[in-house]
Image: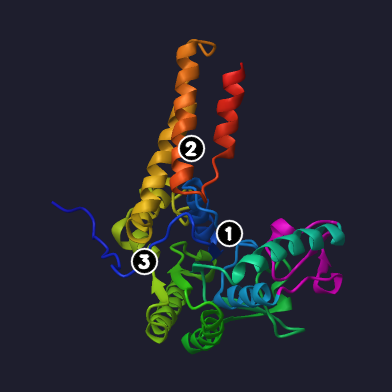
């Protein structure tokens, strides 16, 4: 008896190794997957603007990364005792404008240096609803709890998203023909919009992504994170206490599907070997000063050296330092 509805995973998704350059942007789901990729020895750049929810803010952020824009004080505004950027998450905010600018520009510069060398760009769209500043007509990435009267709220159209990303992807792929783009829709419901409005929003995103896949075959792909949670894990036990965000178990389940479809055999081997090394280092010996334990540590160092010889792009400095410190004790 089958108690779930299996979601068919795409067979044509690009596969990556830890040597590849990855940039993940968008909703909290991008943050979750980015953290798991980092644990798996990848070196992803994750949300250099902080969490972003709507497609237009994501595309604006990407264009700023491409041009290497640096922010100035006139790009900020002061509200409730703090300086904020309308393009950045509240994590960048501070009572001091200089501190905000330093945080923003350091992150922008780092991401700008990598943007033209990417192997994979993974974007997670959360909502098609946007807030436009009435004074400027610009879509903001974060309202920073300003009054709703400051904004006009509207839902993007499918064509608006497709037109914007057709221009963006054309430029990115022309500069970097090897670039692969994986698009996802966040499974997190935006309940404040209302359940029906949330469904219309998610449908808008899905339709836009479908058109972009058709327009950029071999470059733009879709990973069904949304369907995995809402269809295959159709049960509130897979949600956090707010009944909106996925639980850690659900995130891990979607991650396993991502690993199954997007990681190469080399990447899987590295993950397994890294896990074995971490387990060995977490072992607590009865006699840490014994020759037997020192031989054990020496074997870990040899295993790391063999992995580094095969995959020179891996960074095991932290683990080797731990071994050397324990060997001297």
Q: Give residue 46's mark.
A: 1
Q: Could you tell me which quadrant the C terminus lies in?
A: top right
Relative horizontal placement of residue 237, taking residue 298 as reference (left or right)? left
Measured as percent of width and height from the top left, residue 301 is found at 49, 31
**Residue holding disc 2:** 305
Q: Is residue 137 magenta?
A: no
Q: Quadrant of residue 117?
A: bottom right
What distance separates the C-alpha of mark 1 from that of mark 3? 20 Å
Mark 1 or mark 3, earlier in chain: 1
What residue is drawn where x is 50% and y is 10%? 290
Residue 142 location in percent, x, y? 67, 68
| Membership of 73 in magenta stretch | yes
Q: Secondary structure at mark 3?
A: loop
Q: Residue at x 54, y 11 (%)?
A: 289
Between circles 1 and 3, the one closer to the viewer is: 1
**Residue 324 place in picture, x, y as percent:** 59, 26
Can residue 6 be spotted in the picture? yes
**How many neighbours does mark 1 have within 10 angstroms: few (below 14), some (14-19), or many (20 or more)?**
many
**What is the spatial separation of the Cα atoms under label 2 and label 3, in whole angstroms?**
38 Å
Q: Identify the magenta region.
A: 68-95
Q: From mark 2 to mark 1, how far is it between C-alphas?
A: 29 Å
- Judge left or right: residue 213 versus residue 294: left
Instruction: Tell me if I can see residue 256 in this picture.
Output: no
SS for callout 1: strand
Residue 55 image point, x, y percent: 55, 76
Nearer the observer: mark 2 or 3; the answer is: 2
Of residues 184 and 157, which is closer to you in this image? Answer: 184
Circle 2 or circle 1, nearest the eye: 2
């Amino acid at each position: 008896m089958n108690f779930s509805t299996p979601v068919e995973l795409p067979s044509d998704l690009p596969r990556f190794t830890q040597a590849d350059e990855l940039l993940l942007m968008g909703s909290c789901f991008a943050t979750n997957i980015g953290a798991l990729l980092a644990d798996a020895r990848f070196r992803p750049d994750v949300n250099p603007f902080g969490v972003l929810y709507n497609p237009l803010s994501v595309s604006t952020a990407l264009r700023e990364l491409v041009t290497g824009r640096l922010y100035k004080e006139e790009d900020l505004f002061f509200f409730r005792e703090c300086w904020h950027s309308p393009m950045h998450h509240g994590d960048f905010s501070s009572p001091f404008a200089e501190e905000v600018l330093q945080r923003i520009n350091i992150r922008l510069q780092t991401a700008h240096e990598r943007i033209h060398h990417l192997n994979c760009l993974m974007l997670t769209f959360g909502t098609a609803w946007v807030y436009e500043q009435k004074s400027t007509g610009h879509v903001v990435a974060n309202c920073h709890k300003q009054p709703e009267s400051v904004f006009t709220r509207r839902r993007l159209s499918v064509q608006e998203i497709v037109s914007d990303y057709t221009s963006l992807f054309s430029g990115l792929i022309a500069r970097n023909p090897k670039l692969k783009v994986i698009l996802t829709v966040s499974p997190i419901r935006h309940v404040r919009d209302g359940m029906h409005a949330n469904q219309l929003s998610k449908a808008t995103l899905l339709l836009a992504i479908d058109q972009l896949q058709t327009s950029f075959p071999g470059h733009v792909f879709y990973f069904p994170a949304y369907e995995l949670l809402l269809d295959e894990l159709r049960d509130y036990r897979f949600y956090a206490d707010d009944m909106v965000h996925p639980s850690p178990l659900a995130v891990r389940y979607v991650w396993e599907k991502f690993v199954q479809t997007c990681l190469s055999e080399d990447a899987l081997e590295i993950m397994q070997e890294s896990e074995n090394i971490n387990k060995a280092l977490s072992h607590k010996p009865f006699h840490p000063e014994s020759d037997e334990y020192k031989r054990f540590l020496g074997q870990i160092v040899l295993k790391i050296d063999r992995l580094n010889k095969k995959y020179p792009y891996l960074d095991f400095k932290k683990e080797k330092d731990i071994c050397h410190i324990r060997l001297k004790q």
